[in-house]
Image (cartoon, grey):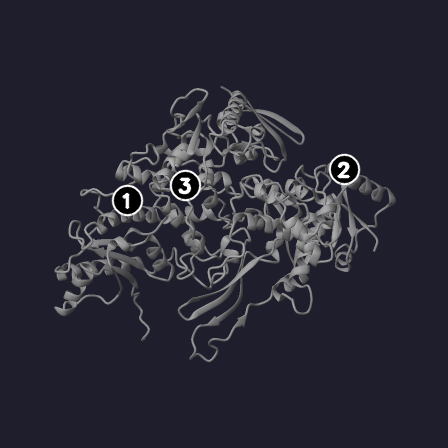
Amino acid sequence: MDNQAIAQKIREVAKKLLSEGKVDVVIGYAQGSVPMRDYPYFAYTPEEAENLTWSGFCNSNLANFTIRRPGRMAVVAQGCVTRNLVGLIKENQLKRENLFVIGVASPGMLDRNKVQAAFPGKLITSVQEDGADLVVTGRGFAERLPRKRFMKDNCYTCVQRNPVICDELIGEESEPTHGGDIDKVAAPWEKLAAGERWAEFQETFKDCIRCYACRDACPLCYCHVCFVDESQPQWCGKTQDEADVATFHILRAFHCAGRCTDCGACEAACPQGIKMRRLTSKIEKDIRELYGYRPGMSLEQEPPLVVYRPNDPQDFIK
Amino acid sequence: MPPSETFEPRIAAFFCNWCTYGGADLAGVSRLQYPPNIRAVRIPCTGRMNPNFILQAFRLGADGVWVSGCHPGDCHYIAGNMFARRRFAVMKRLLEYVGLEPDRLQFSWISSAEASKFQQTVTEVTAAVKALGPARFLRKDLAEVA
Amino acid sequence: MANKILAKDQLGAFVDKLKAGREVFAPALVGDKVVWSPLDSAEGLLLDFSNTDLSPKDFFFPQTECMMRFANDAKAPDGMIMQAEPELKTPRALMNIRPCDAKAMQVLDLIFIQDQMTNDAYWRDKREKTLLIGLACNDPCPTCFCTSVNCGPHHEVGLDLLLVDLGDRFLVKVISQRGAEAAAGLPEAGAAEEVQAAELKAKAEAMITEGVGMDNVNAREVMELYEAPLWDRVQENCLNCGTCTFCCPTCHCFDIQDEVQGTDGRRVRNWDYCMSWLFTMHGTGHNPRGTKKDRVRQRFMHKFKYIPMKRGGEIGCVGCGRCVQLCPVNIDVRRVVNQMNG
């Protein structure tokens, strides 16, 4: 099913749910006012549901908007997003009975920064998906490019394109993965000598402006008081000093340990195009290697950091 | 304090109240000699450890951080150290991944009876951190103007 | 002051003259982004770009600025006494700054150095030592809306010189005395060039089709706007991050903090953002803008209603369009203001 057809079906399902009063709101996407940016949209009536859309540029994680939200809601969700929904249910931020999952098999989401990088400094006025192609139009140019070159990094190594929980599936399930091997690309700095890693880390985060878009777009970050905002003591300074920027990213990555589904919403939200998954992929890899756990795959799993085994690895402990 | 030519590391040490802190006390009472570089912080249990604490120690100028508690199975709170063990593994790997030298962040299980193990471990940890020189990464430096 | 002509093959000499005693900066393509960078020579000068992702306000209002230092030691002879940071040593020139950004600095003057009581020395020092040479927009972006917020693609307010690209040469509009000095020695412009520039200006202005209506925003009572139902929907997808605030050339909120480490101390000012709950959090625990709706509403009301009310009609927005491009959830300021306009 192509994206237009999926969008049409999402609208139908949404209208039905709303007119039958099964949910109070359908959380999906609407078309943005700039290219390559569809945005989270809240449809409360069948008329508003007409605005719902679906494309490779639906890159917020809608699970983020379900946290502690009162009432019943339907959410348009592909694989990784449903894993986050599972995570939120287990963390008691969301009740399963209040949630209706409109599941979609992920087509492989698209990275607007990659598309822009193919036209450095040039103005792009529209990007259309056309089957296996992307048609990019701008001031003084129009090009047809292969869609699969412009997917988000995390989508190449996706292990769960299909929803893990679903109340109504739009279209068919797809192949479960996109074929990439996460272990080939995760934690890239492991290959470097220890002395070079800090320099890579600094280089990756040198453009960070501490806007916290990564944190605010992330469905895992929902603390009433984020550690960044604590002041007695102040764990993380508010300045642009190396130590402050580093502390923020390291601690945030740690807080996502055992919970991050590699949805890439952080990278998609970052206005500076920072590739923070170079850091977070390390945590995901370690959790899998140490404790054999993949977050959000089922409601029955036990999150790895709230349980223990008598024989947990401890070779690093004297 | 007289100026010193050799580097003396400052090591933030987090000891659980029931085991390692007791072990450190026993080492003191037994007059066991050990290097004076650690600054001990008593926490009720290693389960109280928070990655914030480790980063804060480095931020404020610690050259090394050492966390020590009860052996698994002996925790005063039954399983605090079991949860901590998982957190430590993840945090240590993450910090080493971003470039922190492995010897700067150390963990141990030392019971309240193990005064000699305490003496031995504190000596090892101090020597290892000393060999690395002053910590450079993660240290908040006010002289910097961002 | 007469306008001048700068032939493009004379750019090298012009830049070299600028660099005498100054540090010169200009937008440059670094990787695949356009960012403000030091300019070594006219060789690297980028002319074909829309705008930088982050505004040049950082030159005058750094994201982290050390204001003063002190020795945190009551016994030391100079202990516990604030020492001011040194002033800017070398004057600077910003080349190819867009008219919207230059006007934005003028708007920020109204905040930082508005009168004798509010005279931010840090801001003033850097402003007085920086020459602004604008590059007029002949090809505004679809997200630009400067013409509906008292600005425009060839706007001159806030600039010392404005370069209009005529093809093989620039018309150099001389706006200030400092600009005249920088352009001294250039040949005077002729009528044909002035006409050509005027045509480019009209064409650029006509390209900006999606603007904001401000008539009703200005006319409506502040409480009527404040209590309008539109905010319930506008705030829905906002993440309350700082992206819009930090990329905006007119946003100016900051947080001052003392940082102390042993016997060193400093007072530092960092950008802050009103989208954060912490921004208005009181020590008592009360938060006057405790809900997301309060904060989202604040941003638009401040820029489009309170600032015009308090600053004689000046709008707290110059229509650069950065927030429209960078907002992760596509909250389009034009859409919001047009809703405010009814």
Q: Which residue lies under the disc numbered 1?
A: A306
Q: Residue at the location (28% across, 41% down)? A: A304
Above or below — where is C195 with respect to C66? above
Q: Position of residue C32 (x, y in %)?
A: 56, 39
Q: Is residue B55 left or right of residue A316?
A: right
Query: Do callouts 3 and 2 point to residues on the same chain?
Result: no
Q: CA distance from mark 3 to mark 1?
A: 25 Å
Q: Position of residue C23 (x, y in %)?
A: 63, 56
Secondary-structure class at tag 3: helix
C341 or B60, nearer to the observer: C341
Q: Residue at the location (33% across, 38% down)? A: A285
Asked whether residue C245 appears in the rendered view, the answer is yes
Query: Do callouts 1 and 2 point to residues on the same chain?
Result: no
Q: Residue at the location (30% across, 64% down)? A: B10
Q: Which residue lies under the disc numbered 2?
A: C206
Q: Position of residue B12 (x, y in %)?
A: 29, 61
Q: Which residue lies under the disc numbered 3?
A: A278
Which callout, 3 or 2, points to the residue nearer the camera? 2
Q: Is residue C14 left or right of residue A234?
A: right
A35 or A96, nearer to the observer: A96
Q: Position of residue C133 (x, y in %)?
A: 71, 52
Q: Given the current orientation, which residue lies at the most extreme right position?
A: C191
**In the rendered structure, the residue with mark 2 lies on which chain?**
C
Q: Amino acid at mark 3?
A: Arg
Q: Earlier in the sequence, mark 3 or mark 1?
A: 3
Q: CA distance from mark 1 to mark 2?
A: 61 Å
Q: Amino acid at mark 2?
A: Ala
